[in-house]
Image (spheres, rainbow, N blue to C red):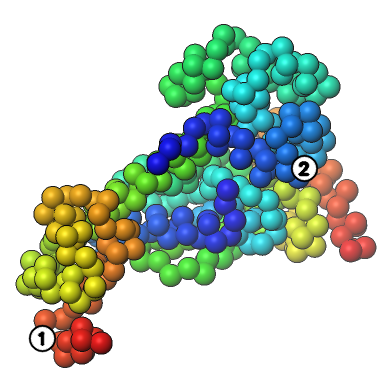
Amino acid sequence: MRQLTFDGFLSKYVRELSFCKSNSLAKLSAEAEELNPRLCEPLLLYAFLTHDKNTIRRLFRQNQILTSEFNQHFFQFDNSSDFMSALELNCSTFPQSYYKVYKSYLSLRDRYQNDSHTKSLMKKKIVTLQKQKQLTDYRIYADLHINSGNFNAFMKRDCLDRLSLEATRKVLRYLEDYIPNNTLHKKQRFN
Amino acid sequence: MLRVNDIKERLLRLDEDASLLLNDENKYRCFIVGGGALVLMGYISRATHDIDVINHVPRDLISLMEKYDISTNVSAHIDCFPDDYDYRATKIDIKTQKIDFYTLSLEDLVISKLSASRDKDIHDITENAVLQALNWSLLDKLAKDIRQSLLSDREIDEFNGHYRDFVGRYKNATANF
């Protein structure tokens, strides 16, 4: 799967945040000045990463706030990679409001890693409960109709991507609810 | 971009991770503020990415919150919020295990935005739905409270200016809605 890039994120972000639902810098600049000040930070970031400095200055010249912010925080960078390094380092000269947009991007980009982290936390609990309640792997994957190969890879080889978050959640709930020798569980198992 | 259901989904994920990470029996409280709260309460419909919270949670959970783009930086500006905001907060209707989530009252949110005094904050609180739902007498009481918690004369003067302007411009206008 292709990784989400920061400019890809910003392109969607400014479009969704704007009333005009456009990626045109001229339209967004006009809107940010009068109607939608919330657009300023993502718009400046988007403009800097996708256009050259002269174009940006020309397009923003009607908007004093954008022009002054651009000159103050962006003009010093020669290229986007220097700029991205400063942003990644959470450079102190950069206002937090810009870093906040970057953090939103990171959170969206890393959402699959977040799923893995949640699954690893769940797995720890699953292993403990399985020991406590003395359930075999077979009992679990058969009762929950989970593919045995995927279940074994998840449990024995720590391949967290072999079970979805939803399936892992299902295993955990099953073990939490399981009462040894519970007839209701046995009935459910065969339904 | 986050809409109401996306915000709730993110809070549920945070709660799930918290319940897996923390083995204590405690239940924690977390107060959603800012634009995220207004979206959750249905007063504004714009999309938002980040969620700002005032938290009463252990340090372990702070890094977890950052993963879900839930910002706790607002706690550094706690003096922008009237005292006892927790008594007026409303519990969000989601079933959680470890963290109870609340939204601040509309009046507390408006006061906090007037204290922060940024253009984009003021913009959110001039939405028709917000103005119509405001309890103006409670707002007045909270404005008196916040003046006592603001630290400097400059902050108080700025707040007074914004508050007078907001009330003057919108209080009577809401009668005509």
Q: Quadrant of the C terminus of chain B?
A: bottom right
Above or below, comparing residue B115 to residue B25 in the picture: above
Residue at (32, 58) in percent of width and height: A165
Alpha carbons under labels 2 and 1: distance apart: 62 Å
What chain letter is assigned to the residue under label 2? A
Q: Judging from the image, what secondary structure is the residue with disc 1 in?
A: loop
In the rendering, at what x and y percent does residue B1 appear?
Answer: 58, 48
Residue at (47, 46) in percent of width and height: B70
* Closest to the observer, B92 or B111: B92
In the rendering, at what x and y percent does residue A157 appear?
Answer: 13, 50
In the rendering, at what x and y percent does residue B122 appear?
Answer: 74, 43
Mark 2 surroundings: few (<14), some (14-19) or many (≥20) residues within 10 A: few
Residue at (43, 36) in percent of width and height: A3
Label 2 in the same subunit as label 1:
yes
Q: Judging from the image, what secondary structure is the residue with disc 2 in?
A: loop
| Residue type at tag 2 | Cys
Describe residue A90's horizontal placement relative to residue A65 as left or right. left
* Closest to the observer, B91 or A39: A39
What chain letter is assigned to the residue under label 1? A
For the residues bearing labels 2 and 1, Cβ distance under 8 angstroms: no
Labels 2 and 1: the sequence-earlier one: 2
Which image quadrant for residue A179?
A: bottom left
| Residue carrying label 1 | A181
The answer to whether residue A190 of the structure is visible from this angle is yes
Above or below, comparing residue B126 to residue A81 in the picture: below
The answer to whether residue B76 of the structure is visible from this angle is no
| Residue type at tag 1 | Asn
In the rendering, at what x and y percent does residue A129 appear?
Answer: 14, 67
Residue at (34, 51) in percent of width and height: A115
| Residue carrying label 2 | A20
Mark 1 surroundings: few (<14), some (14-19) or many (≥20) residues within 10 A: few
Above or below, comparing residue A65 to residue B85 in the picture: above
